[in-house]
Amino acid sequence: GAVVSQHPSRVICKSGTSVKIECRSLDFQATTMFWYRQFPKKSLMLMATSNEGSKATYEQGVEKDKFLINHASLTLSTLTVTSAHPEDSSFYICSARDPEGGFVFETQYFGPGTRLLVL
Amino acid sequence: KNEVEQSPQNLTAQEGEFITINCSYSVGISALHWLQQHPGGGIVSLFMLSSGKKKHGRLIATINIQEKHSSLHITASHPRDSAVYICAVSEETSGSRLTFGEGTQLTVNP
């Protein structure tokens, strides 16, 4: 089946630094990728939709200057948490839509997630 | 009121028991997904369905579009089934975007 990877799987950083998280589709081209945030014991919260070659679409309440998304190729999207603060500590998950995966709009594959801890 | 509601929120079972997790939604959908999230955080897509019933091994998923309800069943449950099970829907009007339920924490004791 299709595989989506994320890197790093875990990162600890100091407050004020920026952290980049990569999401890659390994065996398919993903025109659309999604970035989610998950708080402990809570469900996933969509942060933004990343479209290859165009600007990301952010959900209401998500600061686009804080969470920079770049989808430069059909297999890679990056999320950069700029000037991270302790409240940004969370579990970040990406998913990628495989347009060839059957249901044209529906097939999504999830990455393993990145756990960010900001000290 | 959430657009996707799951019940129960927590479920503890003994190994071998038949388990049912329910999902109700209030919007028009193009597909419903059942996802499994393990303690480490990784998410696996179990089923994607828009009608009827699907079966994969010990897992069965059903959906009733008229009643806007889906169930996930696990037969002969095993401790390795312990995970959070999440129901998510693709809304008719939002393309690929998923709306998630809160999840059901399942613990299967040996």
Image (cartoon, coloured by chain):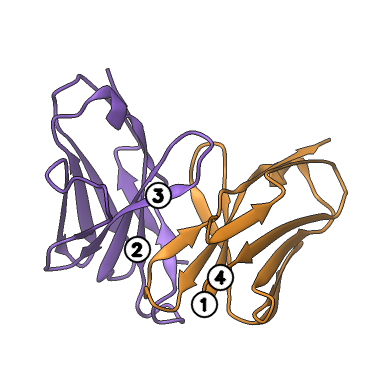
Chain colours: A purple, B orange
Name above or below for residue A82 compared with residue A87: below
- How far apart in space, not on screen, are marks 4 and 3 (Cα)? 17 Å
Image quadrant of residue B6? bottom right
- How far apart in space, not on screen, are marks 3 and 2 (Cα)? 15 Å
Secondary structure of residue under mark 1: loop
Name above or below for residue B29 compared with residue B16: below
Q: Amino acid at mark 3?
A: Met
Please state if A68 lies on the left or on the right of B70 as rendered.
Answer: left
- How far apart in space, not on screen, are marks 1 and 4 (Cα)? 10 Å
Q: Are marks 2 and 4 on the same chain?
A: no
Q: Are marks 2 and 1 on the same chain?
A: no
- How far apart in space, not on screen, are marks 3 and 1 (Cα)? 20 Å
Q: Amino acid at mark 2?
A: Ala
- 10 Å neighbourhood of mark 3: few (<14), some, or many (≥20)? some
The picture places residue B108, in percent across and down from the top left corner, at 77, 40
Q: Which residue is mark 3?
A: A45
For the point 43% across and 64% down, the residue is: B98
Q: Are marks 3 and 1 on the same chain?
A: no
Secondary structure of residue under mark 4: strand
Secondary structure of residue under mark 2: strand
Q: Are marks 3 and 2 on the same chain?
A: yes
Q: Which residue is mark 1?
A: B28
Image quadrant of residue A58? bottom left
Q: Which residue is mark 2?
A: A96
